Amino acid sequence: MTENEQLLTRVADKARNTRPWGWTSLPEPVDAATVARAEAALGFRLPPLLADLYLRIGDGGFGPEYGLLPLLDSPPAGEPAAVTQYLANREHARKDPDWPWPEGVLPISHWGCAMYACVDCRGPEPTVLLFEPNADDADHAWYVDAPSLAHWLRAWIDGTGWYEEMNEELEMAPWADFRIRTTATPAP
């Protein structure tokens, strides 16, 4: 069994036994056609581990705090789906250039207070970023939450994430690539 297979098994076990706020049950997984529709709407592919979470565990409804957002449909708690939120963030960034949203950075989980855990789907490793806009400055709103989606999932399973009461003092590094990823010349 590969490392990702072992991780997916652990995530599935925890997902079956815990409910994030606003979720009454674990939604059924999506099918491959739904992932393909999501990728077509986004304009980029999901990292394999993220796609596997949706294909094998559930369409959101598990994970830390408010849990993983569903891929295309709104969850019971009323949050927009990941694809909808990404497209809205990109559109808002076009209207407000002081708050650019990096291409390929998909919000996957809401923390409340407009904060999101996001996966960098364009990076060599699917880094998990924290978008924390309450600093009132886009340059100080992005942090590296975990070096990879696998690390982020393990932190949730093991109870070692920054959001855990005993770990609230953990410091996150700013995302150094934010300005690089938001000032690149757009493709024609």
Image (cartoon, rainbow, N blue to C red):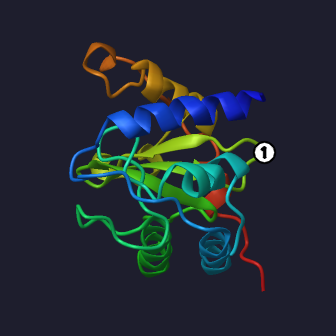
Nearer-the-camera pick, 111 or 12:
12
Nearer-the-camera pick, 176 or 60:
60
**The disc labelled 1 sits on which kind of residue?**
Pro
User: Where residue 38 sits in the image (x, y, percent)?
Assistant: 60, 73
Considering the image in quadrants, where does the N terminus appear?
top right
Considering the image in quadrants, where does the C terminus appear?
bottom right
Q: Around disc 1, counting alpha carbons within 10 Å, would you say few (fewer than 14), some (14 to 19), or many (20 or more)?
A: few
User: Where residue 60 sits in the image (x, y, percent)?
Assistant: 42, 55
The answer to whether 70 is drawn above or below residue 16 in the figure is: below
- Residue drawn 31% across the image and 23% down it: 164
Query: Pointer 1: what residue?
Result: 124
- Residue drawn 42% across the image and 32% down it: 14
Query: In this view, which residue lies farthest toward the top?
Result: 166
Nearer-the-camera pick, 186 or 151:
151
Do we see residue 165 in this rendering? yes
User: Where residue 132 sits in the image (x, y, percent)?
Assistant: 36, 46
Q: Quadrant of residue 122?
A: bottom right
User: Where residue 16 sits in the image (x, y, percent)?
Assistant: 39, 39
The answer to whether 98 is drawn above or below residue 172 in the figure is: below
Q: Is residue 142 left or right of residue 56?
A: left
